[in-house]
Image: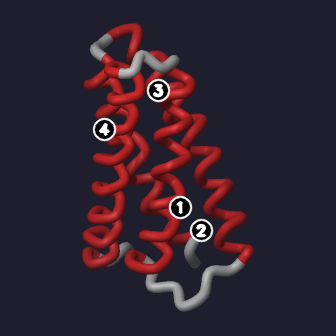
Amino acid sequence: MIKIKLVVKHGIVSSLCAISDYVLFIVLYKHLNFDLNISFWTSYIFVSIFGFLGHAHFTFNLSKVTFKNIFYFLTQLLIVASISYIILSHLVILIDIKFAKIIQLFCTFFFNVLYGKFVSFK
């Protein structure tokens, strides 16, 4: 069973990542008029690095990051990136980009918690 403390810690790091991802994406896409792909991937890669470090040290208290952790985290990133981009690219046709990005972020949160707990940072 997932402990509440883990969910809270994951929530803190993930919230900081989500806010950073959202702000960077919106600045790139809406204010600097970057392409959807460039905005998505730039914010996603930047936040993923921050998220890996935050989750490794704060959420899961790893004393040492191994190649295995990095490999599984990269696998997680590819899965989540694929899901996220599909969701975002479809929602942007239907609703405002700001709401589409928020929905996309929420849709991947629990997958990240479970995958991180049982695979990436095990």
Amino acid type at circle 2 is: Ser
Earlier-in-chain disc, 1 versus 3: 3
Residue at 52%, 85% (x, y): give it: 62
Which residue is found at the position 41% from the left and 28% from the top? 28
The residue indicated by pointer 2 is: 120
Q: Which of the two discs, 1 and 4, sits closer to the camera?
A: 4
Figure quadrant of the C terminus: bottom right
Q: Could you tell me the amino acid type at mark 3?
A: Ile
First in sequence: mark 1 or mark 4?
4
Viewed as shown, does residue 32 lie left or right of 98? right
Q: Residues within 10 Å of mark 3 (few under 14, many from 20)?
A: some
User: How far across and down, in percent of the image, does residue 119 sit?
Assistant: 60, 68
Rendered image: mark on residue 23: 4
Under mark 1, the amino acid is: Tyr
> Disc 4 marks which amino acid?
Val
Q: Which of marks 2 and 1 precedes in the sequence?
A: 1
Sequence-earlier tag: 4 or 3: 4
Q: Are marks 4 and 3 in contact (CB under 8 Å)?
A: no
Query: Label 2 to label 4, Cα distance in Å?
Result: 26 Å
Badge 3 element: helix
Q: CA distance from mark 4 to mark 3?
A: 18 Å
Circle 3 residue: 87
Looking at marks 2 and 4 on the same chain, the residue that comes earlier in the sequence is marked by 4
Q: Nearer the viewer, residue 117 or 42?
A: 42
**Secondary structure beneath label 1:** helix
Residue matched to label 1: 115
**Alpha-carbon distance for marks 2 and 3?**
23 Å
Question: Does label 2 or label 3 sit earlier along the sequence?
Answer: 3
Q: CA distance from mark 1 to mark 3?
A: 19 Å
